[in-house]
Amino acid sequence: MPFDLELLLRLKRAGWKVKIYDFERLEPPHVTILFKTRAWRLSLRDGAFLDRGDKWSQIEEAVRAAVEEAWEVLQQQWDQMHPDNPISSQDDE
């Protein structure tokens, strides 16, 4: 079951979501930030966006603040959901 970060009601009503999906175990550890049908994938190892062209200026400031405030919780949730691909293991690629 995916993990949903609790956001302010006004952000949820506007269409914002922050999720860690349970089916992404083979991908680099990341959180997905969603706005309606648009998605940004943010690395939980280094905080960089995984997809070219994505940047914080495209995301509501309050969503960024929620992600930053819950950073450790997001990392713990990833590690709990994907113990075979933990945050602490660095990519050797």
Image: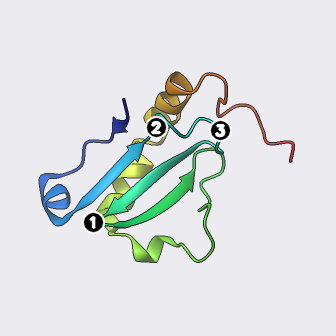
SS label for mark 3: loop
**Does residue 81 lie above or below 14 as drawn?**
above
Q: Amino acid at mark 2?
A: Leu
- How many angstroms separate mark 2 from mark 3 (CA)? 17 Å
Rendering coords of residue 64 (x, y %) = 39, 60
Q: Residue at x 17, y 66 (%)?
A: 14
Q: Nearer the viewer, residue 15 or 11?
A: 15
Residue type pointed to by label 3: Leu
Measure the alpha-carbon separation of dots 2 and 1: 21 Å
Residue name at image x 46 percent, y 37 percent: 74
Dot 1 corresponds to which residue?
Answer: 36
Instruction: Name the mark on residue 74.
Output: 2
Sequence-wise, the earlier of marks 2 and 3 is: 3
CB within 8 Å, label 2 to label 1: no
Horizontal side of residue 31 vs 11, given as left or right: right
Residue displayed at 36% across by 50% down: 18
Q: What is the x, y in percent for residue 54?
A: 54, 72
Residue lying farthest to the front in this orientation: 23
Q: Secondary structure at mark 1?
A: loop
Q: Residues within 10 Å of mark 3 (few under 14, many from 20)?
A: few
